[in-house]
Amino acid sequence: MLKKLSYLFILVGVVFLTYGGYQFYYSSVMESKRLEEISKEVSDEVITTIDDVTIFNYDAIREGDSIGIFYIPRLDREIPIIEGTDEEELAQGVGHYTGTGFPGENKQIVLSGHRDTVFRQFGELEDGDEFHVKMPHGTFIYEIRNHKIVAADDTTVIDYNRQDEVLTVSTCYPFSYIGDAPDRYVIFAYPK
């Protein structure tokens, strides 16, 4: 009986490892595909001032669309930005929280990603590091100024009424936690 129980535990372990490996593989493949697609559309021209943000046609963006590239110079990492933060979008890149701002709108822009896929090295970032948001109409550069750790259900870091531009980037925390993490690591970056 003990031998059969041991085999059962081994089988369950193999099933979990196979499932986890498949999810990681699927996420990597989809992220690469999305990055390849959107790379053809973004501009590396840095935008510092905007006269009329309506020319960017942000209203045409729909959930699931690839909308840009999130580049982290310190990590030399490019990640596709996908509209929406459901599991399907987060499995393919960084999710843009629907209803928050876009670059140049003088609102809060909220991006989220998984700590075990797109933000694996997020803990290495420091104040002064940059984020580049590459969109079809240009690249917007933000500088990290601070961060905080909040409970997973704390939504006070999202302010739909904010009237100044801030890029808020969040991921699960602690970074090495296995399973659903109890907190969120939130970084605040401002236009440079």
Image (cartoon, rainbow, N blue to C red):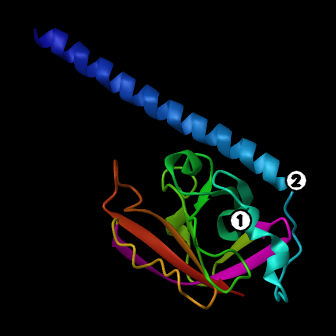
Furthest residue toward front:
59
The residue tagged 2 is 40
Task: Name which of mark 2 and mark 1 comes first in the sequence.
Answer: 2
Depth check: give the residue in front, 127 or 170. Answer: 170
User: Residue 149, position in %: x, y?
Assistant: 38, 74
User: Residue 80, position in %: x, y?
Assistant: 70, 55
Mark 2 → mark 1, Cα distance in angstroms: 15 Å
185 left or right, relative to 45:
left
Query: The disc labelled 1 sits on which kind of residue?
Result: Tyr
Dot 2 crowding, Cα within 10 Å, few <14, some 14–19, many 20+: few
Q: Are marks 2 and 1 in contact (CB under 8 Å)?
A: no
Name which residue lies at 66% across and 40% down: 30
Query: The disc labelled 2 sits on which kind of residue?
Result: Lys
108 left or right, relative to 178:
right
User: Residue 162, position in %: x, y?
Assistant: 55, 88
Q: Is residue 147 magenta?
A: yes
- Would you identify the image quadrant in which residue 11 lies? top left
Q: Quadrant of the N terminus?
A: top left
Region of the chain picked out in magenta, as a range: 134-151
The residue tagged 1 is 71
User: Disc 2 on helix, strand or loop?
Assistant: loop
Depth check: give the residue in front, 16 or 168. Answer: 168
User: Disc 1 on helix, strand or loop?
Assistant: strand
The mark total stands at 2
Depth check: give the residue in front, 11 or 40. Answer: 40
Q: Quadrant of the C terminus?
A: bottom right
